[in-house]
Amino acid sequence: MFTLNPALSTFNNDLVPANIKGKPIDLEYFVDLPSREDACECFKRAAKRMLNPPIWHELAGWPSAEFRLAGENGTDLHRLALEGDFIRINIPGPGPLAGEGYDWVKVEKLEDHHNPEGMREWIGMKVRPCSNPVHTDLETAHFFQSDATSSYIIQRLGSKVTVFYHGRNEVPNTSTENMVDGVRNALVAAGAIVSLSEAQWSALSRGFLNKEL
């Protein structure tokens, strides 16, 4: 049985920064498995899903955004995410002109502590809004400013597997070169701030832990 509770996990500041501005989001979603072996398998499956953004839409379901993993030239990557990769986000509705219709984030931090023989193992990924990698301009192509971060963490402790999501410093990106982008970002960010974002990350967390897609 799954239970969803707001919570604050204890991970280092490189992975989960302090929240200086905006409303922080802290979600915890966990499942208790019948055995440690079942939990190890669940953790391994969930970790692979976390590093595979193209399947996130399928995991979270409609009306979640669609995600693609991309390299420095913006082309799709058909592998699991690595530090330095980009994630192209297609949110329902108009996208920012700066991102050619897409919001963009960069995989800034990955920590992998697989330890199937031990009592505890965990893996974490932090992403940050960034500019469109296809172009050389530095304008952030995302509805949040570049100070914002999203951290996804999966932990196994014995036979319990938990997904943590932490959103930090989420402030609308309205100081854009294009007025249309500024208005669009304000509207999308407003929706995210009033719990639409929490609904998507909650659904995705459940998808990480579900046995079947």
Image (cartoon, helix red, strand yellow):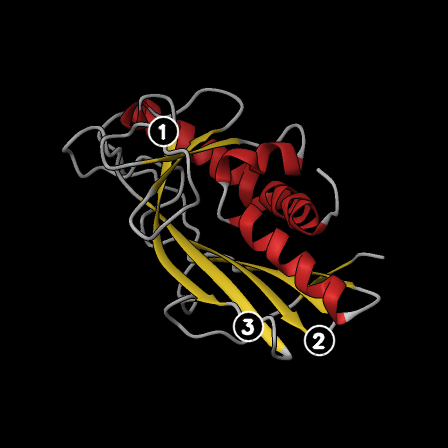
Residue 207 at x, y = what percent? 68, 44
Look at mark 2 in the image and give the residue it sits on.
Answer: 158
**Mark earlier in primary sequence (3, 1):** 1
Quadrant in which the C terminus appears: top right
Q: Gap between marks 3 and 1, in whole Å?
A: 31 Å
Look at mark 3 in the image and give the residue it sits on.
Answer: 115
The amino acid beneath tag 3 is: Asn
Mark 2 surroundings within 10 Å by alpha-carbon count, few (fewer than 14), some (14 through 19), many (20 or more) = some
Quadrant in which the N terminus appears: bottom right
**Mark earlier in primary sequence (2, 3):** 3
The amino acid beneath tag 2 is: Gly
Report the residue at 45% width, 65% height from top: 112
Mark 3 surroundings within 10 Å by alpha-carbon count, few (fewer than 14), some (14 through 19), many (20 or more) = few
Query: Which residue is outermost to the bottom?
Result: 119
Q: Secondary structure at mark 2?
A: loop
Report the residue at 61% width, 47% height from top: 201
Mark 1 surroundings within 10 Å by alpha-carbon count, few (fewer than 14), some (14 through 19), many (20 or more) = some
The amino acid beneath tag 1 is: Asp
**Mark earlier in primary sequence (1, 2):** 1
Q: Is 51 left, or right, of 61 in this rendering?
A: left
Mark on residue 120? none
Residue 120 at x, y = what percent? 61, 76
Q: Gap between marks 2 and 3, in whole Å?
A: 11 Å
Look at mark 1 in the image and give the residue it sits on.
Answer: 76
